[in-house]
Amino acid sequence: MRLVDASSILWAWDTYPIQQFPGVWRWLATLVEDHELVLSEVNGEEVGHKSEECASWLREHNCRHLNVSDGILKEAMRIKGLLGIVDDRYNKKGVDENDLICIATARIHGLELISDEGLQLNPPTNPANFKIPRVCGMPEVQVPCMSFKEFLASSGAVF
């Protein structure tokens, strides 16, 4: 099972329009229906705010949304502390609350995360500016993370 960040499912929705790439979406539908691809509760809501069509497709295929538990919230708070984020003063260049909950959900459930936030090959000096892949790679976090394109390529699926 893999956890898909809102950025990735929305990127896929925009990059591979269902009318032009029906094979990709049939394949994804199978993965979603088999709960091989899941979303965190907050990412499901985020998708709904940004693309009702994508959210409707996810609902149609019974996408599983992992609930936010106390353990996930505690883990998100721990990661927030590692990044030096105080109160709700998130930097627009870095992760936000939903991102932290997504990462914490992947960590608590032992899942690989699919995210299409920037890799930041040159890490920012301020950890509060880290994006999802950089946070996932921190020694204190260690959540496997790949982009949707890497996920697609590594699947070996042919359409």
Image (cartoon, helix red, strand yellow):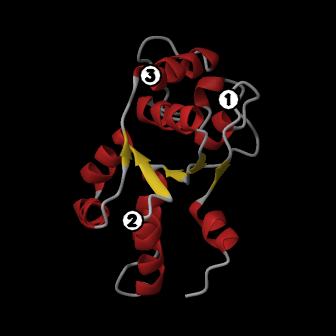
Task: Give how far apart the Cα atoms at labels 1 and 3 are.
Answer: 14 Å
Categorize mark 1 by other alpha carbons within 10 Å: few (<14), some (14-19), many (20+): some
* Residue 73: assigned label: 3
Q: CA distance from mark 2 to mark 1?
A: 29 Å
The alpha-carbon separation of the residues under discs 3 and 2 comes to 27 Å
Label 1: which secondary element: loop
Q: Is residue 89 visible?
A: yes
Kind of residue at badge 2: Glu
In the rendered structure, find residue 141 and report the number of the disc placed on it: 1
Depth-wise, is mark 3 or mark 2 nearer the camera? 2
Label 3, secondary structure: give it. Answer: helix
Disc with the residue nearer the chain's start (1 vs 3): 3
Closer to the N terminus: mark 3 or mark 2? 2
Q: Nearer the viewer, residue 93 or 130?
A: 130
Quadrant for the N terminus, please: bottom right
Q: Nearer the viewer, mark 2 or mark 1?
A: 2
Residue found 67% across the figure and 77% down from its top: 156
Q: Position of residue 143 (x, y in %)?
A: 66, 39
Of callouts 2 and 1, the N-terminal one: 2
Q: Nearer the viewer, residue 29 or 49?
A: 29
Say which quarter of the image contains residue 41. top left
Q: Which mark identifies residue 33?
A: 2
Which residue is painted at 38% across and 31% down in the image? Answer: 68
